[in-house]
Amino acid sequence: MKKLLAASLLTAGVAFAQSGIAGGQDGLHQYNANTMGQWRFELGTGGNVSLDNWSLAKGGVVKDAKTGKDFGIYEIDGSFAGNFNFSMGLFSWMDIGFNQSLNYDYAGSSTGLEEDHHMTTIGLGDFEGWVKFALPFTSDSSVMSFAAIVRATGAIGETAAGIRPRHAWYVGPGGFTEPFTANGPTIGADLIMTADWTKRGVPLRWNTQVGFIFALEEDYPNAITYSTGLNWFLHKKVDAFLEYSGEMRVSGDYDFEFMIDPNIITPGFRFHLSRSLDLGIGLEVALRNVKNLTYKYSKEMDEDDYIAIHRYGEHGEHATYGYASTPLYAGAATLVYRFGGDDEDPAVAAAQSFAVDSTAQARLDSLVAARAVRNDSLARVDSDKDGIVDLKDQCPNTQEGVSVDSLGCPLDADKDGVPDGLDKCPSTEAGAPVGPDGCETDFDKDGVADHKDKCPNTAEGVKVDATGCPVDTDNDGIADDKDKCPNTAAGITVDETGCPKDFDKDGVPDSQDKCPNTAAGITVGADGCSLDGDKDGVPDGLDKCPNTEAGITVDENGCDLDFDKDGIPDVKDKCPNTLPGVKVKEDGCPVNKKQDLDALKKGIQFKNNSAKLTSKSYGTLDDIVKLMNQIPEANLEVQGHTDNVGSDDANQKLSQARAQAVMDYFTKKGIASDRLRAVGYGPTKPIADNKDKAGREKNRRVELVPFSK
């Protein structure tokens, strides 16, 4: 009996966000295949309400994930799900509409934690728009009729609020849930079948629907929706109905179990309070009751069918609880108001009454007589004087003097919307837009009618072609009136003035320029590339040595490379590491051998597999010290090299130690350490083949290389 308390309230709103959604007139959760009729409208509202805490969470228990505490919800708590909807018949075969849901969850506990989690709240749900089509093989006279609905929702619902997910596809990845919103848009489609036996005199109508909802939010489940309902027309003012409706997840992180997802049975009545107003009431009974008919708490919390809901509040609060797809019991109601369309004839309505008393019969007789008088009067009136009486005149306000057809509408031979009597161009081409005089419009006055004019905004006076576009003689995309180079050759890319593009301004058009990024001031050839007379890679305009011999490597100025700045190009210099100021011979080597680093370095020797200098090396090293003192601006990099015998790591360390030993000798002799640096290259820079002894001996060496600070 505890759970039956939940059925005690009804409230305004739309039951389970379905009633009235498709313009139907049956039950609460049913979809009817019939369309409303053109320019008919419906406003609907209703809802369902439950006062039981098991309608919010399994067992009415919620856990605060941060503290680990359970806070049991008071027994007399509950939820409301409702909406407001509007629909209209756009055509006799198509209805459109929208639905805005509104939700309210109330949860109270002795801990007060439910307030921290923003669970007791009223909030908007997602907005839904839909279109309903009567399928073409449906007949008005047939018992069977079919329709289809396409729908889409926008995720405008309030987040971080509420407790019970309002739809199965709200259960997100890992149970992360926003109870009032799908957290992203959805699209869906439904197929509806109606069997209406009232057309055969039997007071029964059966509706069935199946649909699919696709969630666009990543990892959120998709779902199948379904409903069926039988309606028994007890009286012209009252229908009884029995419905079954539900939702079924077909994807997502949790295994599907039919009895967990929303499934409800709804008996009820629908009252036709007037020709325009319906009131429906019913009792929603969840199918999940079957799994726990005695309402045992332990069975309700059974882990076998437990879906864990994880919900985060607006300030990061984290709650977990068991998924309750629907209330166990809920009271539901809907109120629908219809208007618009062709008003029903009072005489016909009276004739179809179940009982007509003498007063009603007298009123009917009076209406019939009044109609006869009105029709007789209309049969003689011709308000627009076109020769067709108003009763038959489908164009009752025709301008005086205009010729009309048998229906009273103006004659229009070329079907351009201008009556022949006013049409100055009575043979206008079909479909061509015309002005008030019936002639084709020409907005830009270029002589080409607007419906043929591909350039309808041509400036006045500009010469145009047959399509109404400015003439472009050289077909370069620039109209002749703006083209400063009107005879550009075919295929040449032009700028906004119609002249060939020349990005680097070297006088060669881009289409012919093989070097389109030439620097300003550089002389170029016919192909747009820089001239280079001595073929050294430096353009003549930048070449300070324009007559370099072929094959000579040059610097950025086009002059021979001379690393040691001794006046002998590197390509001819046999001693490329000469120190500054040293007098050299024609081959680049110092005149004084004691100033020749390439000769001196050969006297630097080490003990076998050691970084210790031999005593024979000291004389050579002293000569180098003397040379460094003579040339104070000189700086030396001492490079150690080895052969490839042994490991690379050992060779690297040995070469570095040998270079450092030479540098240490120099510093002990008074050479400043900032004029020196020691670098070990190990076996990485051989100058001979390591395969033979002679080659390995050459590779075991010390190099002395000048450097600049």
Image: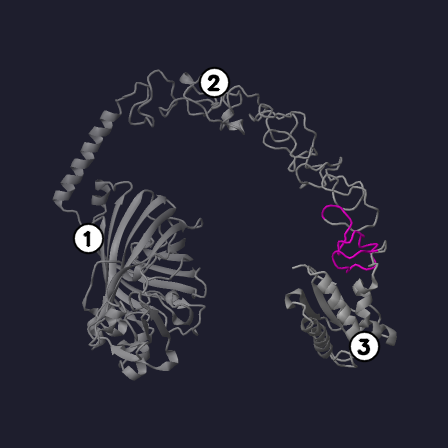
The answer to whether 514 is drawn above or below residue 422 in the figure is below
Camera-side residue of 200 and 37 = 37
Asked if the stretch drawn in magenta spans residue 51, the answer is: no
Above/below status of 233 relative to 492: below
Asked if residue 529 lies left or right of residue 101, the reply is right
Residue type beneath disc 3:
Lys
* Residue under the point 30% across and 18% down: 385
Query: Can you name the residue that lies furthest to the left here?
Result: 359
User: Whole-Å distance between the Cαs marked 2 and 3?
Assistant: 119 Å
Whether residue 87 is visible here, answered yes or no, is yes
Residue pictured at 18% horizontal, 32% vertical = 370
Camera-nearest label, 2 or 1: 2
Q: Amino acid at mark 1?
A: Leu
Decide which of tag 2 and tag 3 comes sooner along the chain: 2
**Mark drawn on residue 425:** 2
Applied colour scheme: one colour
Give neighbour class at mark 1: few <14, some 14-19, many 20+ (Cα, 10 Å). few
**Mainly helix, strand or loop, the magenta region?**
loop
Which of the two marks, 3 or 1, is nearer to us in this view? Answer: 3
Q: Which residue is at the front of the view, 643 or 568?
A: 568
- Residue tagged by mark 3? 616
Residue kind at label 2, given as amino acid type: Cys
Q: Is residue 240 left or right of residue 687?
A: left
Whether residue 576 is in magenta: the answer is yes
Question: Looking at the rendering, which quadrant does residue 311 occupy?
Answer: bottom left
Asked if the residue at tag 1 contacts the one at tag 2, i.e. Cβ–Cβ closer than 8 Å, the answer is no
Q: What's the magenta region?
A: 556-584
